[in-house]
Image: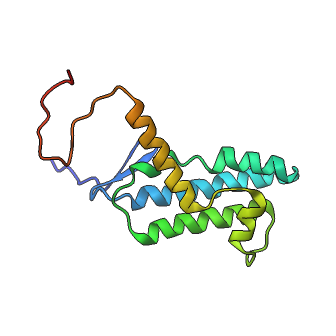
Amino acid sequence: MFFGRIILLTYLGHIISDSLADDSDILREVRSMFVRSNILKRRLGYCSQPVKVVLFRSYCLNMYETVLWQSFSAKSINRLCSCYHKCMKHFFGYYSRYSVCSMLFELNLPSFDTLLINSSAVFDRNWLASDIYWPRVSGSQPFDGLRT
């Protein structure tokens, strides 16, 4: 009996590769963002700009798993950044050569880097405020049981 090697595994909607790199999961997020923005454009493209901003914030800025990505290539994260800007321009009707800084300022939306930093800060704040004790993974001290 031969058992093949599993290269990619999907667990709770996230892609885990055999090399534990997060590039596959980032590309999944890219596809997901394109799908969400296209659905919003098709169904609610006629709404006013303030309504579109609220919809975009609700459906396209919820990238919770970004703080868990540890091993990825610059190419993958640049694709996600490019996807973020393209989806925003497409949804709000800006032409492709329009300045990203001007668009972000007009819409009062965060830049991609700000989005990543804020999600990391929120995760860290919630992590420190929780009562959960987790053992150190990369530290030299072994797990010694529950916190007293």
The picture places residue 19, in percent across and down from the top left corner, at 27, 59
Q: Quadrant of residue 92?
A: bottom right
Is 76 on the left-hand or right-hand side of 96? Answer: left
The picture places residue 75, in percent across and down from the top left corner, at 45, 72
The residue most toward the top is 148
Give 32 or 111, whichever is nearer the viewer: 111
The coloring applied to the image is rainbow
Is 51 on the left-hand or right-hand side of 130? Answer: right
The picture places residue 49, in percent across and down from the top left corner, at 84, 53
Query: Which image quarter holds the C terminus?
Result: top left
The residue depicted at 42 percent of the width and 70 percent of the height is: 74
In this rendering, the count of numbered labels is 0
The residue depicted at 44 percent of the width and 55 percent of the height is: 25
Is 111 on the left-hand or right-hand side of 8? Answer: right
The picture places residue 50, in percent across and down from the top left corner, at 83, 49
Q: Is residue 88 above or below residue 96?
A: above
Q: Is residue 21 above or below residue 57?
A: below
The residue depicted at 62 percent of the width and 50 percent of the height is: 61
Is 145 on the left-hand or right-hand side of 83? Answer: left
Give 4 or 132, whichever is nearer the viewer: 132
Give 3 or 140, whichever is nearer the viewer: 140
The residue most toward the bottom is 97
The residue depicted at 79 percent of the width and 69 percent of the height is: 94
Give 55 or 131, whichever is nearer the viewer: 131
